[in-house]
Amino acid sequence: MRLAYRVEGSGPALLLHLGAGCDSGLWGAAGLVEPLARSYTCVLFDHRGHGESDIPRGPEAYHLDRLTADVVELLDHLGIQHAAFWGYSMGISPGVRLAETRPDRVWALIASGAVGPPDSPEEVAAGVNQRAAEFREHGWENLIAGFEKQEPDPIPAWMTERIRATDIGQFIDTLLSIPSWDGWEEWEVLPTLTVPTLFLTGELEDRDDDVGRIVGRMPNGQRERLHGLGHINAFLARDRVLPHVQRFLANHAPS
């Protein structure tokens, strides 16, 4: 496996990990890297199946433990003992898994997106099979349409173009791997984390305030709810997101 990354800036390490669509260049396109690189060593990672990294086939290649091991191997490769981890969308899961299993490697966790109570294993299996069939037939289009319907303001065209340019097969394989994440569920793991954690959640992607409920059960969790924004535009809202991120990182960065 060839996995691509690049490093910008200096200071305490901050690993930037995306979810199902787009490549690591999204962080720069959203205007997030340049201000962060003034204070942190930003590690931009094209996780497997994305950007310039290889695209393995088969659900087993996208098991959560494999995605998390890739992060550990990247930190080892760079000689970084511990880093902050900022994950967007499905990229939250490897960060939570890392904070659960290797808290010595994570000094802070930032999660852009929402989580909710788990479905039953039967519902999970049925759901991923149905969604996989839809993605085989329609590619990214239904997902993009759903996000556009959620947002009151248009999603930038450059963002939807980046999603469409991402290999759909790796996302289908990732979906099909989820039932094999034996017994692992963010909703149960999050309250056990000792790593300082910040959730940045669009109000419109978390209408029932599930994130507020789970953060209330976390010993070192906090949440910023971005009014009037959905899953994508809450991530892209640089001027609203960065102040929270910079303050949180500054409060927890190692000396």
Image (tube, rainbow, N blue to C red):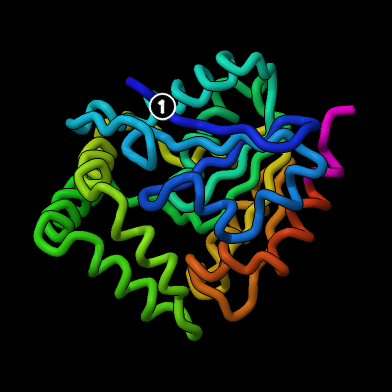
Horizontal arrangement in the rendering, residue 102 relative to residue 166 (left or right): right
Q: Nearer the viewer, residue 85 or 216?
A: 85
Q: Where is residue 171 in the image (x, y as percent from the top left)?
A: 27, 46
Q: Quadrant of the N terminus?
A: top left
Q: Is residue 140 above or below residue 68?
A: below
Q: Which residue is at a point 82% across and 35% down the rendered structure image?
A: 253
Q: Position of residue 185 (x, y in %)?
A: 42, 39
Compared across the picture, whether 60 is left or right of 27 comes to: left
Say which residue appears at 38% left-offset and 42% top-offset. Answer: 51
Q: Is residue 195 visible?
A: no
Name the quadrant containing residue 6: top right
> Is 195 contained in the magenta span?
no
Spot occupied by residue 251 in the image (x, y as percentages of width and height): 86, 43
Q: Position of residue 235 (x, y in %)?
A: 56, 62
- How packed mark 1 is, by other alpha carbons closer than 10 Å (few <14, some 14-19, many 20 or more), is some
Q: Residue at x 50, y 72 (%)?
A: 230
Identify residue type, mark 1: Leu
- Residue 253 colored in magenta in the image: yes
In this picture, residue 87 sits left or right of residue 60: right
Q: In which quarter of the image is the C terminus?
A: top right
Tag count in the figure?
A: 1
Q: In this view, does 111 lie above or below 76?
A: below
- Give whichever of 6, 226 is nearer the camera: 6
Where 127 sits versus 193, above or below? below
Numbered range of the magenta stretch: 249-255
Can residue 232 be seen?
Answer: yes
- Asked which secondary structure carries label 1, the reply is loop
- Which residue in the structure is indicated by mark 1? 3
